[in-house]
Amino acid sequence: MKEKQSILLTEGSIWRKLILFAIPIFIGNVFQQLYNTVDSLIVGNFIGNDALAAVSSSGNLIFLQVGFFNGIAMGAGVVISKYFGAKDFKKLQNAIHTDIAFGLIASVILTVLGIIFSPQILTWMGTPESVLPNSILYFRIYFIGATAVVMYNIAVGILQAVGDSKHPLYYLIISSIINVVLDLFFVAVLKLGVGSAALATVISQAISAILCFYRLIHYDTVYRVYPKQIRIHKSMLKQIIQLGLPSGVQNSIIGFANVIVQSNINAFDVNAVAGCGSYTKIEGFAFLPITCFSMALTTFVGQNLGARKLDRVKKGTKFGILCSVSLAEIVGLVIWIGAPIFIRLFNDDPEVVAFGVKQAHTEALFYCLLAFSHCIAGIMRGAGKAIVPMITMLITWCLIRITYITIAVRVVPKIDVIFWAYPLTWTLSSIIFLIYYKKVDWIHNFERMDR
């Protein structure tokens, strides 16, 4: 099938192009967050507190492992957007097929690691005994389908890197609806338990991955995928690793720090795990404007620096940051006000609600700082400076966060102390990012990247 080229972000109105590119990502993230939330809503209401805690305790551990490989995929997206912006279609093809080959290899590794090490890591995290069997089951079923998860993210990364954010949205809507229907059928009707919620997620992810690759393989575009050409190109893999490894390490750093936070929350009781897990699902909605603009800025910066349109980069980054920070704070205010109602949707146990509300009232008004940090990180990735956010988040979101929690909880053994770890480290990272963004000539450093 002959398909019109994706719209370049290097031409036309900056604000219009950024918003039009970001909106489908935003809507797609809404649906993804909805079907992630549905897992917890259905499990919490139809099975109970222990099951809800099991799903909640698995989340950070899943991000710890999946986040590393998704970070590598981010590096591939930067390489792809650079060559697409420069209209170097031969290297674009090599980058895309290398990215897919890497994803297939990563899928196998991730599946093995997830299945083998889940019991040990969950035990190390101090997961409550009543929750542990269901957590292991949920985790293992999820990672049996790791190929679907990884390859979906690879395919979406390719499409977004070339300026197509609409089709991933369509496929995500379809998979979200399927996930909700399967969740209800498996858990509420067949009463198959926690593992079936993970199975529903895997099936829906597989369907969305198939739809993405069908488009990439069957439509005649400059970024078309040819299955017989899927292999590793050493020069491309080197670029992808150079740009993606820092992002992968960064994601793992965040995931590791959050695992430490989760292990401290686990030390309280099942209600704390369930309440904080419910808040985490709600907090995911605050990430929607943050994620969509940070991803949009990565692609925008990569394409425009590839086309050597430096003034356009400066204007676009300022606009993207302003939008993300403003929207994140609005969402934070809504969550702060509506926290009691939102938490009660997952479980109406007063203790569960109290823990979730307390965390929301501690963190929600600081989402503007979280948005700023993620936007600068996205900009730096697009400019080929992925090591900057990696080091910044290693220091602030990992070392300082873990040190703070380790010391503070011993001095003041209250769960509030754990919650404050997030606003404090978001503030520190924002200060460092602001200084770097203003003082360092990160734009012209892009010139040294291999063309």
Image (cartoon, rainbow, N blue to C red):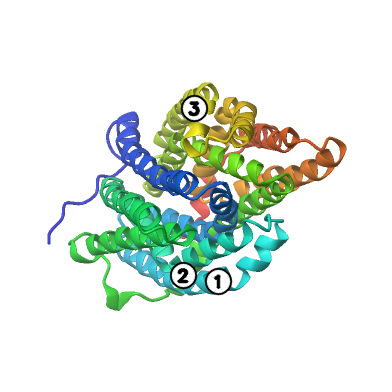
Q: Position of residue 250 (x, y in %)?
A: 60, 52
Q: Which residue is mark 1?
A: 115
Under circle 2, the secondary element is helix
Q: Locate residue 183, reporting x and y percent.
A: 37, 53
User: In the shown orientation, is residue 357 left or right of residue 157?
Assistant: right
Q: Residues within 10 Å of mark 1 (few under 14, many from 20)?
A: some
**Vertical arrangement, residue 92 with respect to residue 169, above or below:** below
Residue on which disc 3 sits: 341
Residue 394 vs 15, above or below: the answer is below
Q: Nearer the viewer, mark 3 or mark 2?
A: 3
Nearer to us in this view, 340 or 98: 340
**226 displayed left or right of 125:** left
Task: Residue at the far right: name it.
Answer: 411
Q: As displayed, is residue 121 above or below residue 161?
A: below
Circle 3 residues within 10 Å: few <14, some 14–19, many ≥20: few
C-alpha span from label 1 to label 2: 7 Å
**Residue flagged by tag 3: what amino acid is it?**
Ile
Question: In the rendered structure, are the residues bearing label 1 and label 3 in contact, judged by CB atoms less than 8 Å apart?
Answer: no
Label placed on residue 144: 2
Q: Is residue 146 left or right of residue 10?
A: right
Q: Are marks 1 and 2 in contact (CB under 8 Å)?
A: yes
CA distance for labels 3 and 2: 35 Å
Q: Secondary structure at mark 1?
A: helix
Q: Residue at x 77, y 35 (%)?
A: 414
N-terminal label among 1 and 3: 1
Tell me if I can see residue 333 in this picture: yes
